[in-house]
């Protein structure tokens, strides 16, 4: 975040995207374990920057997307890399979290 503040122009905007959690017990430092960072508020304020965060509003689009999929107009299945049984979910998550090559989207099959 501090590198973004340094690199974004005066009165510019920063959009924070990704997956963030309120806490991460396995993080590398005490602040990150609590979901916190050291942030240069003074420089950001001085530069007049604005910062936007938050989760994407999925509910605004999922019915529309469902209808497009049902009608065959879109096929999001191209991103699915693996279909595995539910018992292997922890292993799959480790691959996905480590960004291992070829692990883009996993579908879990409970009855498999």
Image: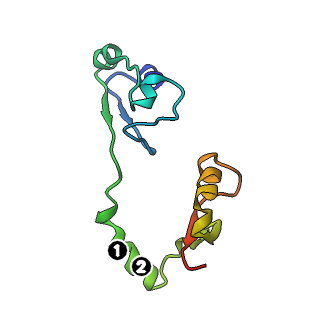
Q: Label 2 neighbourhood size at 10 Å, few (<14), some (14-19), many (20+)?
A: few
Whether residue 104 is visible, yes or no, is: yes
Query: Is 49 on the left-hand or right-hand side of 71?
Result: left
Dot 1: within a 10 Å radius of its alpha carbon, few (fewer than 14), some, or many (20 or more) residues? few
To which quarter of the image does residue 12 belong? Answer: top left
Residue drawn 63% across and 70% down?
A: 84
Using the rendered view, name the quadrant where residue 59 is placed.
bottom left
Q: Is residue 35 above or below residue 106?
A: above
| Quarter in which the C terminus is drawn | bottom right
Q: Which mark is residue 22?
A: none
Q: Write the residue at 39% across / 30% down.
A: 34
Give the residue at mark 1: 64
Name the residue rendered at 44%, 30% in the picture.
Answer: 33
Number of numbered callouts drawn: 2
Q: Image quadrant of residue 110? A: bottom right
- Asked whether the viewer can see residue 79, the reply is no
Does the residue at mark 1 contact the one at mark 2 (Cβ under 8 Å)? yes
Q: Is residue 108 above or below residue 30?
A: below
Q: Give the image location of residue 46, x and y in percent.
A: 29, 14
- Residue 15 vs residue 30, the one in the foreground: 30
SS state under label 2: helix
Residue at 45% across, 23% down: 30
Residue 93: percent from left, percent from top: 58, 54
Instruction: Find residue 63 and report its horizontal and vertical position in percent.
Output: 33, 74
- The label on residue 68 is 2
Disc 1 is placed on an element classified as helix
- The residues tagged by marks 1 and 2 sit, at their Cα atoms, a distance apart of 6 Å
Outermost residue on the right side: it is 101
The location of residue 98, given as percent across then percent down, is: 64, 45
| Quadrant showing the N terminus | top left
């Amino acid at each position: 975040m501090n590198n973004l503040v340094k690199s974004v122009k005066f009165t510019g905007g920063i959009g924070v995207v990704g997956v963030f959690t309120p806490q991460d017990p396995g993080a590398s430092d005490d602040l990150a374990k609590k979901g916190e960072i050291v942030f240069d508020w003074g420089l950001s304020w001085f530069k007049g920057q604005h910062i936007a965060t938050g989760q994407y509003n999925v509910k605004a689009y999922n019915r529309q997307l469902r209808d497009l999929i049902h009608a065959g107009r879109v096929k999001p299945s191209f991103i699915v890399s693996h279909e595995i049984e539910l018992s292997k979910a922890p292993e799959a998550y480790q691959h996905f979290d480590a960004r291992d090559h070829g692990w883009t989207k996993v579908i879990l099959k409970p009855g498999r």
